[in-house]
Image (tube, rainbow, N blue to C red):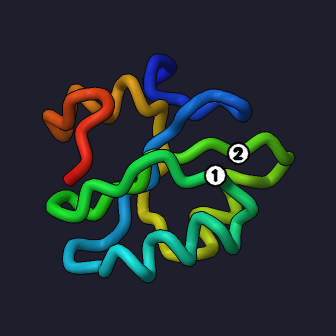
Amino acid sequence: LIAAWPVPGRPMAAFFPAGTGTVDIARAVTDASGSLLQIDSISSVAFTMGERDGFVSALYGAGAWLVIDAAFARLCTGSPAGSDR
């Protein structure tokens, strides 16, 4: 579990409920003051980065049901680094 812990200033993955649209995911990330790196629309995952305190909490408040380290998340989703789906 420690390997999956999101660290501010490092890429993280925010998992949203299945079927959440890419526009809604992008809005949730930007509303939380994060930088959007990639959206995996098949898995409803946003790869993002945020520096401010409370960023992870803001993602949960915006509808994410899980926020973890991006490197760990890629193992779970099978998303290769840099892919645009």
Q: Is residue 35 left or right of residue 26?
A: right
On screen, 7 above or below 14? above
Give the class, few, some or many, for how many residues have Cα within 10 Å of label 2's Cα (few <14, many ≥20). many
Looking at the picture, how far across and down is residue 49, in whole percent?
62, 42
Which residue occupies 56% across, 77% down? 27
Q: Quarter of the image containing the N terminus?
A: top left
Which numbered marker is on residue 60? Answer: none
Looking at the picture, how far across and down is residue 83, in whole percent?
24, 38
Q: Nearer the viewer, residue 4 or 34?
A: 34
On screen, 24 above or below 38? below
Of the residues shown, which amino acid type is indicated by label 2?
Answer: Gly
Which residue occupies 85% across, 47% down? 53
**Nearest to viewer (mark 2 / mark 1):** 1
Q: Nearer the viewer, residue 3 or 75?
A: 75
Q: Is tag 2's residue or tag 1's residue first in the polypeptide sequence?
A: 1
Q: Are marks 2 and 1 in contact (CB under 8 Å)?
A: yes
Give the class, few, some or many, for how many residues have Cα within 10 Å of label 1's Cα (few <14, many ≥20). some
Q: Is residue 38 left or right of residue 79?
A: right
Which residue occupies 49% across, 46% down? 37
Q: Quarter of the image containing the C terminus?
A: bottom left
On screen, 1 above or below 52? above
- Displayed quadrant of residue 44: bottom left
Q: SS at mark 1? A: strand
On screen, 42 above or below 84? below
Of the residues shown, which amino acid type is indicated by label 1?
Answer: Ser
Q: Is residue 29 left or right of residue 14?
A: right
The residue that disc 1 covers is 35
The residue that disc 2 covers is 50
Which residue occupies 46% across, 18% down? 3
Looking at the picture, how far across and down is residue 42, in whole percent?
15, 61
Number of numbered discs present? 2
Q: SS at mark 2? A: loop
